[in-house]
Amino acid sequence: MVATTPPTLSNATGTVSATSATLPAPHTLVERFATGHAHIAATVGGWRYTGGKRDLRIDFLRGFAVLAMVADHLGGEPSWLHTITGGNQFLFSAAEGFVFISGLVMGIVYAGIIAKQGVGPAMWKALRRAGSLYMLTVVLTFAFISVSYMLHLPWVVGVNVSDPVVRVIERLTLHRAFYLTDVLLMYTLLVAVAPLAFILMVNKRTPTLLAGSWLLWALYQRWPDQVTVPWTIEDNSVFHLAAWQALFFTGLVIGYHRERIAAWARRIPMMPYLTVLTLLCAGLIWFHRHSAEILGRFSPDGDPTVLTARLFDKGDVRIGRLIAFAIFFQFFLALVTVAWQPLFKAVGWLLLPLGQSALLAYGTHLFVIAFFTHYVMQIPGFRNTSALQNTAMQVAGIGIIFLVVKLTPAVKSVVKTTRETIGAIVAPSQQVLTAPLRITERRGR
């Protein structure tokens, strides 16, 4: 008999026998794993935010902050949306994000204006911006007060206005706040002071600005009654400027020095960085769920209330609140950077318009809350203790605000076109009417 040899198969590494080809070579699984890992890395790498003239990640995050504020202000407990937004009961709220991002955006925008036009024009624009915000705050405050009293809403029931003229003057001079417009009052004052901060940064005094800002925050933590700036604001129980300004001016500094900070941050490996942040966020969520038990162990009487207030009080912007916000904001920013494409496709259509028109969205939400609080509660069978009904009301409110934001540019365009059309029609008529006058003038000459 003639000896036969097994047939051979050709592969990428050479020629192997059929008997050996039936079993994977020792390195085949490793190669497959490496190939799969490379494919995943390439896919995930394609999700990353690639940048642009305007940083859409900031608009995205500010849009989420606006959505969270609407959900937290509208409806009752429980709500399925509060699983995402925190329901204003978490270690920090959307308000911290709104204030910080407002400072961040202002720093980015005015850094460009200063570079192109100089300090003087930039300061003038900032002051004009503060003036516009003042007008917006005053108009929204009086309008919201009027609607609240007309509808007899809960936050004005039982409020005795003994001297309405004094109350009007107090609100015109920003000495008295009102429910839900208090954050706009504080924002107006912060923007009015921002030109001084830009002057310091232009003159390379950024450390002085940060030191002064955080020193004011620290002094307020110890002596809140003595460290009240710029003056005492009545009915302002949450947004104490001496405490909240630290978030705004820190964001302002980061925005102004964005390029330098971004160059430094690019040295940090993104995936390990995101992994660490994910673990820290998971730890904070676990701590929040067990905070009463944990803090109770460190309280003399076993009551965690006092210690919780010292660490996480919102009005004073306590240290625990700042740490939690700093960790979660970095996590969200890193997550949006790494997974921009799928997040943009999933919710970008909603969050970007809200973030890019944050003031319009917030102003609209005041009246959505007013009308929903009055009319929805009168619907037979509605219970604000139902998670389904609360979530449905919040989704409906967010939808209305979204429509207002999307339709406003179209309405403005129609108004502008109408004015131009009317002007084009009226102009010839005005020329015909004024022609005899011009002829008379010429004859008189």
Image: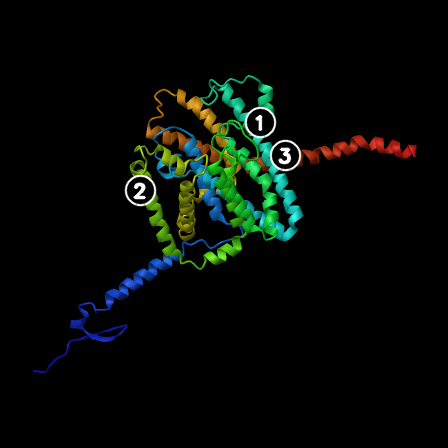
Residue for point 70% across, 34% down: 425
In this orientation, does residue 175 appear?
yes
Q: Position of residue 323 (x, y in %)?
A: 41, 44
Q: Is residue 377 above or below residue 102?
A: above
Which secondary structure, mark 2?
A: helix
Location of the C terminus by quadrant is top right
Q: Position of residue 388 (x, y in %)?
A: 33, 30
**Dot label at residue 192:** none
Q: Nearer the viewer, residue 420 or 220?
A: 220
Which secondary structure, mark 3?
A: helix
The amino acid type of the residue labelled 3 equals Thr
Q: Which residue is mark 2?
A: 286
- Quick check: 437 left or right of 197? right
Say which label, 2 or 1, has the lower sequence index: 1
- The CA distance from mark 2 to mark 1 is 42 Å
- The CA distance from mark 1 to mark 3 is 36 Å
Q: Please rate how many residues cluster around mark 1, counting C-alpha atoms within 10 Å: few if below 14, some from 14 to 19, many from 20.
A: some
Q: Nearer the viewer, residue 14 or 397?
A: 397
Q: Which residue is mark 3?
A: 418
Q: Which residue is mark 1?
A: 171
- Quick check: 20 left or right of 11? left
